[in-house]
Image (cartoon, rainbow, N blue to C red):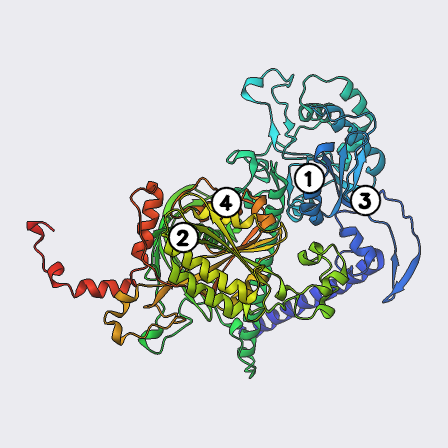
Amino acid sequence: MAKTKHKHSMNFVAGAVFGLCFGFLISTWCRNKFIPCSPTFSKSRCCLESLNPTSNSNDVAINNEKSFENNVIIEEKDEKGFLFIGIMTAKKYLDTRAVAAYQTWARGVNGKVVFFSSEGSTSKYDIPIVSLANVDDSYPPQKKSFSMLKYMSDHYINKYEWFMRADDDIFIKGDKLERFLRSINSSKPQYIGQAGVGMKDEIGLLSLGSTDNYCMGGTGMVFSHETLRLIAPHLKYCVNNLYTNHEDVEIGRCVQKFAGIPCTWSFEMQKYFYQNFKEYKGSFTDTLQEKEVQKAVTMHPVKDPTHQYRINNHFSAAKIQKLREQELELHRAISEMNQVLNENTQFDKYGLKPSVNSFVPSKPSEVIGWEFMTSTSVSSHLNVNPRKGLNSYRKDTLNNVVSETMDIINRHSRQRGRSIDFKDVLYGYSTVDPLNGPSYIYDILLTYRKHKGHNMNVPVRRHAYLHQSFLKTQFIESPFTDKEEHSNSLVNSQVFQQLGGNLENYHAFDIHQETIHFILPLAGKVQEFERFMKVFETICLSRKDNSQMHIVLFTKNSSPEEIENILSIAGKYQKLYGSHLIEVIEADGDFARAKALDLGAKQCSMDDLLFCVDVDIILTKDALTRIRLNTIQSVQIYYPIVFSQYDPAIVCGNMSRCKFETFNFSTWTGYWRQFGYGIAAMYRSDLEKVGGYDTSIQGWGKEDVDLFEKFVTSNLTIFRAVDTGMIHAFHPVICSPDLNPSQFQMCLGTKATVLASQNQLAEMVMNMTEILNRNLENGP
């Protein structure tokens, strides 16, 4: 009986399998016979066309030529474009905002971008402009807006799926806008944007019904081609029957009346079509890393055209970073697969899995320290002052790391029915492995939000262990190494443009021989001046290097002897090498470095390269090359980071046993002056462009910081780098009580910094028993 049951069950299974196979064969034959263009088997163009969301069944085939490829007939048809964006602008903005938009975000739009302006509008730049007949630049631009929609309808209604009306002070993320619109049916009436009903004081004055709204014009409004087709015949009626002065309100009224749809009533659209209320004129200076801005499809307003370029660079850099991450992931995937296949391939460090323990030290001296961080400060063993506030680059790094972390956490939040919001970084640690990259450990405060089932909001804390891998080192050849080879690639370079775009001028130009104009403020300091002139003779005069010296001498507080000695030293070199190479300018009044540098600069022409220097600086010939290479007219200012020596009397103690070499860069002989801005190289034209030195600043310091801040706020780039060819020799710092309080504090800080290293000062204190063993109860 058991055998019979088993036999029957086997027959049943065999029959079921046979039935499934037979049914599959029959269905396949029917599909190929009657539905040859089914998506299941479509690899030809005609089959893909049925899946293309941009295709329209009503399109007429213009080209009916047939070709054969893989035994499949392909019918060539013209496809409809995706997106047409009309930008409303005015004559005064055609060469500024319009150009900035066309050169930045407009290049990333899948479609066409055209600028609509008043009658007779032209631009000296090559941008697409439509000059609307009988339209002026008066505000509000109601006639201009409706005329633009009419032009779109007359010329492009059957050529694009989507149409967008935008202002010239908007930034549009073309890739995000395309992904968003691809998810919507363009064959139905659609009117998309950030819905508005008017300001508080306008409620009830815009002739809107209780359920009526409009799409706000600033952040952009999007129409499907069906919406534009429905309202196009009635645009003249709409512009002749205006109820308000708001053109976006009137467009919304027109769409509601003749297309029968309002603007999208969706809270999500406020995030996609983003209006910046946090910053003045929407510069997006401090908000680019915020979640709302990252999610936005359009960003408004961007009044200053220079911000368009900055914003575009930011998002371009983000895309490059994503591509680099994908490259690293591919390296890791290849490495994992090689391990599975037991392939003996060359070691690829980029294929290693990310780890905060990637480097294992072999001895105590190789241990890499970690810095302790909070959201407001950093405590580091690398700083003279162990605890400091977060500077701008650390804040940006923290924001970038947190943003990347939250993206990873919420990558599958929709499928899991939950989302996690960032609240704050309680504390964290960071380090940099020179071979592998930076690592971070953060204690993050989050909010867990559950959407599926029972809604729940719960605060949670999590530790995040993160590692960023360095990419391969990139080498870029200097364009000045081989002029003939690189002449074609330099057509768009800044130097080539400075030479009038003439290739012959470029070939005759040798940046290594450009004249450097030294500007040296001086008051007393005869010995230091003599040392400086010996250095200048060695690296410039004796080598016949193209250099000129402009000495600005203050005589008021100097003795006649000092003045005579200085003039004697300068005269000696003038006789030997020519007075045209060394110039002495006498200045009146008390010593003021700003006044001296200003006087020296005025002795030079606008195209001269200036090097503002101090008498205590010791230079090498290599420093001159770096000055010439790193200073680019109208582009870049060079602020070298010089090595500042400590007080030899403290460092050496017993001077008879001290070996204090000039170019000894050890931590006990000196420090790199990262916050010193007195030594700088620039062209006079760039100096004048930012307003020059503030000659009202008297006494010690502050004039260099003032000029540095001017360059920071300009469109010029500041290049800072350690220069091993510049040494600031030690000299006692004297701080006059008569100085301005802020200058006096800066002076005292410098005076303390140049004494000795932190470790040596700590050793000195540890050896002072009278300090360590003092009785604090009896007073200090």
Q: Which mark is residue 56?
A: 3
Q: Is residue 271 left or right of residue 504?
A: left
Residue 543 image-quadrant placement? bottom right
Q: Amino acid at mark 4?
A: Tyr
Residue hosting label 4: 693
Cα gap from disc 1 to disc 2, whole angstroms = 48 Å
Residue 442 lies, in percent from the top left, at 38, 56
Q: Is residue 357 left or right of residue 683?
A: left
Q: Which mark is residue 96?
A: 1
Return the residue nearer the eye: 203 or 729. 729
Q: Amino acid at mark 2?
A: Ala
Q: Amino acid at mark 3?
A: Asn
Cα gap from disc 2 to disc 4, whole angstroms = 19 Å
Return the residue nearer the eye: 461 or 629. 629
Q: Which SS class for mark 1? A: loop
Instruction: Mark 2 or mark 4: name the one nearer the start of the chain.
Output: 2
Instruction: Mark 1 or mark 2: name the one nearer the start of the chain.
Output: 1
Return the residue nearer the eye: 434 or 678. 678
Q: Residue at position x 49%, y 72% from top?
A: 352
Tell me: residue 136, above or below residue 290: above
Q: Residue furthest right?
A: 65
Q: Residue at position x 50%, y 43% from top?
A: 286
Cα gap from disc 2 to disc 3, whole angstroms = 83 Å
Foreground tag (2 vs 3): 2
